[in-house]
Amino acid sequence: MKNALKWIVSILLLIGFATGSYFWATGLISSNFNYRSQIKDNPPLPGNALGTASTERLVIVLIDALRYDTSMKPDVMPTLAQLRTQGASALMHSQPPSFSEPGYSTLLTGAWPEINDGPAFNLDFEDIPTFTQDNLFSSAHRNGWKTAISGYYWFEKLIPQSDVDLSFYTPGEDESADIEVMDAAMPWLQKDEAQVVLIHIDQVDYAGHHQGGPQSPNWDAAATRADAMLADIASTLDFSKDTLVVLSDHGQIMTGGHGGQDPDCLLEPFVIVGSGVNPGQYPDIQMVDVAPTLSALLGINLPASAQGSVQSDMLTLPQEVLAVLPSATGDQQLGLLMAYSSALGKEDTALKLLKSNSVSDTQTVIHDLRAQRLFSDRVKRAIPTGVLLALAVTLLLRQRKNNSISWVLGGILFVALFNLRYLLIDRKVYSLSSIISQTDLIVYIASTTAVALILVWLVVNFYNKTFSSLPNQNGLKTLWLGFTVILIAGLPVLASYFLNGPVVSWTLPDYLISFLGLIGLIQILILSALTPVLAGLTVAINAINRKFKK
């Protein structure tokens, strides 16, 4: 009866683990898609225009997914190489998540994904929210510039269309879609119908996702075609009075894909050439620097939520703009800080921190406020995390007579086998960039987990010689083995819970730890489902062996 109760309790626990991990994993994914900025409902107000523009027309060419190293190949992108020698250029850094929608949002608002209130993950068209924060196009339109966008149809939802005078949007992503984009945009340029123009070229990203990734010749071929389109755009401009910007929203890993914290996904080109530009190769910039820099070039207000700074060394700004820029920057940064601290309920703390920092260093204050809130949250989560770990270790120590060390070694072997396939055989990365689809991720993790657990079960049982006697007792030992593997496989889940919280809430997580936690949750689901089956097989094998011995 005592053993029967152990079986019942164990199986109920495993059912609970499986159910909990399923809802936790789906909740974690959904919370990323549903994330909204802390300042969504209280955006800082735009300031005054900076003054005289340094250009008569600004054309932004966004080559989606163009990696920095690809952009530096003169044989692949000769036009871009020539423009780089004529203008100012720098290596640009972005932050995860390195998807397109957060990249577009960062480029146009000057704020990182955590604050800019654009989507954190790419959303379906009907679910994309329109910017709640001030942005380059809204500011330009408000200050009298005629604006135009030709590109992927996500921009139609992101940017308030009342601030876009001319537009063409397409759901296509390949070369033929880019041709349509160019057919729409070229007449605007040739007839000077708009003065702030965004042209979005998407076929490099398409080659990364559907034609083999950057490791394939299709990638460079797509980049070369995009470069030819860039040449057509440049041919319509007079660089003595017009300005051209070429940049990207993210890179891709070599096998194709993006979204995570991978270095290749977070390095992009930035090239600006023409009127108002001081040519040269410049130190690295941040993606949040783009919107305020282009705003200064246009003489409009700095985007109210911008976290970056004007790269004034790259520009030849009028004296009147240079004169007001420090105070305008200070006012804009202070407005952002007050909005952020108000959203966290930390206005008094922000003011105290400001007394020890200059107003121009408000980003440090924002960082400090975020760090304080995170620390407070983590202290609260440390208690249940520590209690759970202590309980698990205590239970394992009490099972020493049943050779619980072999279960721990089995758990370590499971982790080694799983990562042997994941990292060394299939060469996947621990990142959102490796996800082709949710179904693909689940099937891959599930199959790898199942095979690894079965191998561990065989090794541990043969090592302990538990296939030869006492069916009921050895079946329980297999359940204990399963619980131990769940514990060890679940350590990244506990780490993610402690560092990031159970789901994404007021701040974006550390995406490496969060991804490892997501993998761990899927593993726990499969381990919990498979362990009772293996325990039953252990009992059956023991029973058959005993029967043959008799």
Image (cartoon, rainbow, N blue to C red):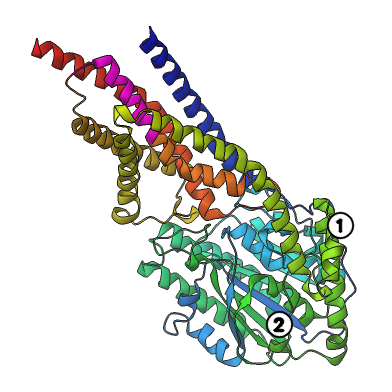
The magenta stretch spans residue 62: no
What secondary structure is marked by label 1? helix
Q: Amino acid at mark 1?
A: Glu
Residue position for label 2? 311
To which quarter of the image does residue 138 belong?
bottom right
Considering only vertical position in the picture, is 329 above or below 532? Answer: below
Q: Residues within 10 Å of mark 2 (few under 14, many from 20)?
A: some
* Majority SS type along the magenta span: helix
Residue 466 x/y as whole percent: 21, 25
Considering only vertical position in the picture, is 77 above or below 487? Answer: below
Q: Amino acid at mark 2?
A: Gln
Residue position for label 1? 347
The residue lying at 28 percent from left, 54 percent from top is: 425
81 with respect to 474 (left or right): right
What secondary structure is marked by label 2? loop
Q: Quadrant of the N terminus?
A: top left
Q: Residues within 10 Å of mark 1 (few under 14, many from 20)?
A: some
The magenta stretch spans residue 480: yes
189 with respect to 423 (left or right): right
The residue lying at 45 percent from left, 41 percent from top is: 520
Nearer the viewer's eye, disc 1 or disc 2? 1
Q: Nearer the viewer, residue 543 or 55?
A: 543
